[in-house]
Image (cartoon, rainbow, N blue to C red):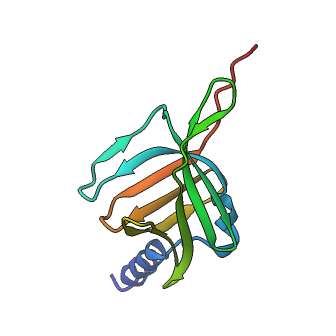
Amino acid sequence: MKRIVPFLLIVLFWSCNDSSVKNEDLHFLNGYWEISEVEFPDGSIKEYGMNSTIDFIQLKEGKGYRKKMKPQFDGTYDTSKDVEDFEVSDINDTFTLLYKNEFSEWEEKLVQLDSVSFSVINQEGVTYKYKRFEPIKIPQ
């Protein structure tokens, strides 16, 4: 039993270790993203198949914007003029996207980020998971 307790403590510590996003990974946010699933605080999950709209994110020097885009079959995108500006802030070793517009303010904590996926959690505890958008290519 004395041998098991330290082993369990090490496993517990290792599993709680935060695999936080690093500053050098933030450039991965740039590009086109589609939502893959949403996990609600009660544990329920909503999965998304095909999306009619995607997000375009542009980030430079800690400031960025997010814009909804609608991919077209010819490879172009339709978009509205609406843009959500944000700033990236390092709060307690966690990168947070801080949004502010004339109507409201909100934030999303960046939970995971790499070249093909990212996820954020909002103030209500809802987790949004995204995957890199790959346009459908139709042979001509």
Identity of the residue drawn at 48% across and 31% down: 50
Quarter location, residue 48: top left
Q: As displayed, is residue 88 above or below residue 119?
A: below
The quarter of the picture where the N terminus appears is: bottom left
**Residue 8 rendering spot, x and y as whole percentages:** 39, 77
Identity of the residue drawn at 36% across and 82% down: 5
Q: As displayed, is residue 138 above or below residue 34?
A: above
Report the number of discs: 0
**Residue 10 rendering spot, x and y as whole percentages:** 46, 80
The residue at the far top in this view is 140
Identity of the residue drawn at 43% across and 54% down: 128
Q: Nearer the viewer, residue 96 or 84?
A: 84
Left or right? Give the position of 99 relative to 63.
Answer: left
**Residue 108 rendering spot, x and y as whole percentages:** 44, 67
Q: As displayed, is residue 64 above or below residue 45?
A: below
Q: Nearer the viewer, residue 116 or 67?
A: 67
Q: Nearer the viewer, residue 7 or 98?
A: 98
The quarter of the picture where the C terminus appears is: top right
Q: Nearer the viewer, residue 54 or 26?
A: 54
Left or right? Give the position of 115 relative to 42.
Answer: right
Q: As displayed, is residue 7 above or below residue 102?
A: below
